[in-house]
Image (cartoon, rainbow, N blue to C red):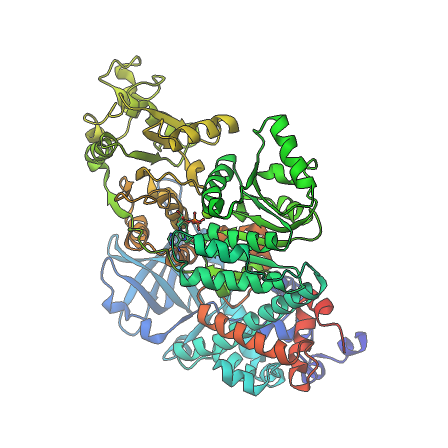
Amino acid sequence: MSAERGAGVGATRSRVTLDTPVTYLKGVGERRALLLRKLGIVTAGDLVRHIPHRYEDASTISPIASLATGMDATVIGTVISKGVLPTRRGLRIFQVVVRDATGMIEVSWPGQPYLDRVIEKQDVLLITGTVRFFHGRQLQAREFVNLGEGAEGAAQGRVLAVYPTTEGLSVKVLRSLVERHLDVLLPLATDPLPPEMLSAAGVPPLGDALRMVHRPASIAEAALGRSRLAFEELLFVQLLHRRANALARTRRTGIAFESRRTLTSALRAALPYELTGAQVRAVREIVADMCSDARMHRLLQGDVGSGKTVVALFAALLAMENGYQAALMAPTELLAEQHCTTITGLLAPLGIRPLLLTGSLSTGERRAVAARLATPEPAIVIGTHALVQDATAFARLGLAIIDEQHRFGVEQRKALGSKGEHPDVLLLSATPIPRSLALTAYGDLDVSVLDERPPGRQPVTTAIRPESARARVLAFVAGQVAAGRQAYIVYPVIDESERAELKSATAMFAALTGAGDGREGEREGEGDREGEGDREVQGDREVRGGWQGVFHDRRVALLHGRLPAEERERVMRAFRDGALDVLVATTVIEVGIDVRNATVMVIEHPERFGLSQLHQLRGRVGRGAEESYCILLGDVAPEAAERLQIFAATDDGFAIARADLRLRGMGDLFGEQQSGAVMFRVADPLRDEELNERSRTIADRVLASDPELTAPAHAGIRRALRERYARALELFRVG
Ligand code: ADP
Ligand code: MG
């Protein structure tokens, strides 16, 4: 290495490979190398794979003369003067005047005086911003790219790549670095993917793709180049997951159940309804897993109300007809009880009674259940995390089912799976995400999807109402209650200590019932102890009157996460049993509670919730035969309104989850740990859903014929995987 360094720049350049550290490239010194490292660029190969995150197209550039106040525009112009102006308020504004062939305009960057050191006279800038009127037209810059001196001609008529950068390294420098070395580096980029695969995926070879992303002739060409790089990432992650899954299956020896069709057929015959096509499919997938000698590790996901419980019940009966025990773990006592009631009903014709095990059983009852489970008799037990406590021992646990799996920690999920003799594991999830995405996110789980609703359920009528309609909305709710129905009213916060500007469950509970602790001024006019002085801090005047105390003679309860667990259970139970009319709550009611008589869900400050969360909340009503309503109440900003319209317009949980993902990113949905495991530089499994689907099909096909990737055609893939992913070393070891 040191000899090479001594050989001088010219000599090293001729021997550049993609593995050459960037420090050996012309134009990169120690300081730049450090900055590049921050962007993940260590070698020449990393540099060619550092691809633009967007493009500026000459066709999107406006002539300066055409700019009008209020326009959002991109211009290219040469800096003819510049300076920093202090304002009276102490803000310093960097300003330049730029000129193109058609005219001049002032451009300003408030609060960014340091730009004076970055932008010089005669530099050509590409600037995007909004045109304001301020002593004449002025462009308020949102983004800009410094193309460098005399670059105006070069930028004309072509698509300009804009690279992700880091502080201290401008786009200009980065672009010129790539430009300078691209011709030498491109021919070195041999494609790890065989040509047949590229054509199957419909993407260009690597060298072409890299040229297309760095020097596109058009935006469409840049997108095509990008798709090749995205495809490779998606394919590689799929290969890793599918391989890990296959290995785990063979290692995970489990119970090979036999489909005896005794109990399962009896259930099928006794069901009060026909299974949906999706349920039949899911049952078939689960039965196939359970009947193989590998251990099942499957996620069953389906929208709220898609009928996951009965699918899980088929699995439980398959275990039982093989002489095993099955356990269903739910996140709350109430849900466990609810499952127990449903399942008791469904199994009554079969003469089977489920066992219930929760923390609130008496010691004696608990002991009796424990004694049953300690005998190797087939049984189905439903419970809370009490099921995984040490005292609970299963003589013959064959199947562990975990409902609302995301509500449990990894440890609790594992704990149930490690009871007894390696039971098969079935996880249930109501977060409906596209299948290919689920496979990417959950890695080595198998996934079944219920993408069909049982028939007969009417959709919940969803409405968005402004603050000014508050009195009418609450009168409507009161009408429903008067007709014997029940209602939920949901708030984003427990009390004003969280966010003073938001309506809170506690304060509104007081206001709606006309009782309360006197802190909430909205009850004014009803003997408010605090009197007039409080008025100024209260919000909207026009809502006053007509609705306070609307539920003063109704049975209303407050429910939120700061109440002790027993108190929460007590309130939910009272609501379920019809002993309450209205529940004023935070999102603690989100989890699968099923109260058929509840027909109204009012959600205040709806913009504070994610779309999937709103959908879960809406799923709490419309569970019975009565027409049901979900009302989003409050004034929201236009962007939020748009988002809420998406929600109101569809009842399809998958569509909503997709929209949510698009708007909020994946981290929210998968949780930190899982999103951290899904690392993509180029691909976006959501935006590239179709490509992801293709990559999954291709990955499956490859592994089916060549599970260890030892075929000569796959040598490139194997090498690339082992170089890039530590996990691949272990997964593709042989050969
Ligand atoms: P989730 O998937 O949200 O857990 P559940 O299993 O609680 O859904 O089922 C929701 C409701 O739909 C239950 O009342 C259940 O009895 C009913 N159900 C399930 N499958 C069907 C079906 N195939 N036809 C009609 N109703 C069904
Ligand atoms: Mg459920």
Q: Classify 208 as above or below 659.
A: below
Q: Left or right: where does residue 167 sit relative to residue 111?
A: right
In this orientation, which residue lies closer to the viewer: 419 or 508? 419
Q: Can see residue 119?
A: no
Quarter of the image for residue 537 reads top left
Q: Is residue 228 left or right of residue 552?
A: right
Q: Residue 232's spot in the image, x, y percent?
A: 56, 74
Up-down relation of residue 153 to residue 138 (above or below): below
Total numbered circles: 0
Please tell me in which quadrant of the rendered image residue 258 appears. bottom right
Q: Position of residue 433 (x, y in %)?
A: 46, 58
Residue 460 percent location from the top left of the image: 29, 48
- Tell me where residue 458 appears, x and y as whole percent: 28, 51
The front one of 16 and 608 is 608
Q: Residue furthest right?
A: 3
Q: Is residue 731 left or right of residue 47?
A: right
Q: Quadrant of the C terminus?
A: bottom right
Along the line of sight, which residue is nearer the eye, 121 or 12?
12
Q: Is residue 659 something that shows in the picture?
A: yes
State which quarter of the image contains the N terminus.
bottom right
